[in-house]
Image (tube, rainbow, N blue to C red):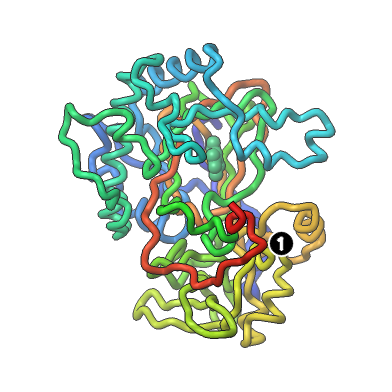
């Protein structure tokens, strides 16, 4: 079914809630509005239903968001720049499992053309107005800029528009201004057979080690605009597969008061809602700077789940058992806790294969990467992957909208062994 978004609920069981049959539903909230008529994404395009989806840790899918003429112009531009050899293998290619590489999968078969290169802190080739069809990219970047304002208003995240630079009016807006470290934009190309393993786009700064706080901003909202002509996932593969929670969350997701989400408490019989678990890393105290907590959406009341502890990347790489036994005081809460997404390593792959509760309480929602479709989701809360493409190239323009870190800062004492401390 070309262009169809299917909502597949897995047959796994929410704790204590009757097992849901595997079924396919058309996601009615996803069949959204007309293509934009004016320059940029008009605010009315972001419907309350879209905002609700993003706030619940689900993807908002806006079919026909980018008019066909713009899809064609950008796809032609991407193909030209690819043919000129300007794309490079990107960091996520490292997500290709080693055993797949041994079987001959090419980790470089996902390639990107970025507008900003964080490691060099300089503009990338996407922002070079002289390359390819710079005018088409400028029109597109203006749409994404308008989307940023609409999301900032709609999601109530004013920080999405706080880039500290004076606003530039109409014709003075340049590609370099519209695409920067705060609005990451890239073309991506998946070669035939390429895939992207399950991941989330952003993690808590504290869990990235000492370097986590080095950058002034974090990814807040992920967006993708597909540039493919009609695409049938049943024939062409390459669907974006997302894994939202089935039960509704009773709390904000992604971040709260500047503290980034690290996990969930699964829905249970006594408490049939999902609760996002946030990591506050600004606590004072000798036993550590971090504590886990949940918060009630209705009244903002926090429940602290753990003692204070020092966060290390090790925490994130360890099994949930460690968190269960060492950190979370309430046995009921400990039993419900799981990470949003454990990082990939040989050990976690082994645990994932042997974890009877893996996938419990999560839905599987596939999105067809058909030309003109815009997908938006919280960068922290939604695990996702790209299924292997079959015999076709898959083109997209995608990126992340950043927010500055808030006052929540690490109080972690400098670690003399850390790579950063040596530098
Ligand atoms: O291309 C897609 O559909 C998703 C890509 C993705 O997840 C990413 O770039 O982080
Ligand atoms: Fe991603």
Secondary structure at numbered mark 1: loop
- Quadrant of res 207: bottom right
- In this rendered view, identify the residue nearer to me: 194 or 205: 205
Q: Residue at x 51, y 78 (%)?
A: 293
- In this rendered view, identify the residue nearer to me: 315 or 24: 315
Q: Mark 1 points at which residue?
A: 358
259 sits left or right of 150 in the view = right
Q: In this view, does 144 lie above or below 60?
A: above
Within the displayed image, which quadrant is ligand 1 positioned in? Answer: top right
Q: In this view, does 364 lie above or below 4?
A: below
Q: Measuring from the top left, give residue 217's x and y in whole percent.
A: 41, 53
Q: Which residue is drawn at 43% across and 71% down?
A: 251
Residue farthest toward the bottom in the current orientation of the protein: 330
- Quadrant of res 393: top right
353 sits left or right of 84 in the view = right
Q: Measuring from the top left, give residue 418's x and y in whole percent.
A: 64, 60
Q: Measuring from the top left, give residue 384's x and y in whole percent.
A: 58, 48
Q: Which residue is drawn at 49% across and 77% down?
A: 294
Say whether residue 54 is visible: yes
Q: Residue at x 84, y 34 (%)?
A: 102
- In this rendered view, identify the residue nearer to me: 399 or 33: 399
Q: Is residue 262 above or below residue 138?
A: below
The total of numbered circles placed on residues is 1
Q: In this view, does 409 lie above or below 29?
A: below
Say whether residue 47 is visible: no
């Amino acid at each position: 079914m070309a262009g169809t978004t299917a909502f597949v609920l897995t047959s796994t069981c929410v704790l204590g809630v009757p097992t849901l049959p595997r079924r396919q539903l058309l996601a009615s909230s996803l069949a959204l509005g007309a293509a934009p008529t004016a320059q940029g994404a008009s605010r009315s395009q972001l419907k309350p239903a879209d905002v609700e989806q993003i706030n619940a840790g689900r993807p908002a899918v806006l079919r026909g968001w980018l008019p066909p003429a713009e899809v064609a112009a950008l796809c032609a531009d991407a193909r030209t720049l690819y043919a000129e050899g300007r794309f490079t293998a990107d960091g996520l290619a490292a997500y290709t499992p080693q055993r797949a590489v041994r079987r001959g999968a090419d980790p470089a078969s996902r390639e990107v053309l970025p507008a900003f290169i964080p490691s060099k802190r300089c503009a990338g080739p996407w922002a070079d107005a002289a390359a390819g069809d710079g005018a088409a990219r400028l029109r597109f970047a203006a749409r994404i800029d308008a989307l940023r304002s609409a999301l900032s208003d709609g999601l109530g995240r004013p920080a999405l528009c706080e880039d500290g630079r004076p606003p530039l009016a109409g014709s003075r807006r340049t590609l370099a201004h519209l695409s920067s470290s705060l609005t990451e934009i890239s073309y991506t190309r998946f070669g035939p057979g390429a895939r992207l393993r399950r991941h989330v786009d952003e993690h808590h700064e504290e869990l990235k080690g000492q370097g986590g706080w080095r950058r002034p901003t974090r990814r807040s909202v992920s967006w993708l605009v597909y540039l493919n002509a009609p695409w049938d996932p049943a024939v062409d593969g390459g669907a974006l597969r997302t894994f939202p929670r089935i039960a509704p969350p009773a709390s904000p997701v992604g971040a709260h008061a500047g503290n980034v989400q690290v996990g969930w408490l699964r829905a249970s019989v006594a408490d049939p809602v999902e609760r996002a678990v946030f990591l506050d890393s600004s606590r004072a105290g000798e036993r550590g700077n971090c504590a886990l907590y949940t918060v009630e959406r209705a009244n903002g009341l926090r429940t602290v789940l753990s003692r204070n502890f020092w966060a290390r990347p090790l925490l994130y790489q360890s099994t949930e058992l460690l968190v269960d036994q060492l950190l979370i005081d309430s046995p009921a809460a400990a039993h419900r806790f799981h990470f949003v997404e454990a990082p990939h390593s040989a050990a976690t792959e082994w645990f994932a294969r042997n974890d009877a509760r893996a996938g419990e309480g999560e839905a599987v929602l596939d999105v067809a990467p058909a030309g003109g479709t815009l997908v938006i989701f919280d960068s922290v809360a939604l695990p996702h992957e790209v299924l292997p493409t079959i015999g076709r190239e898959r083109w997209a323009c995608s990126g992340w909208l950043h927010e500055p870190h808030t006052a929540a800062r690490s109080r972690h004492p400098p670690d003399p062994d850390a790579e950063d401390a040596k530098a």
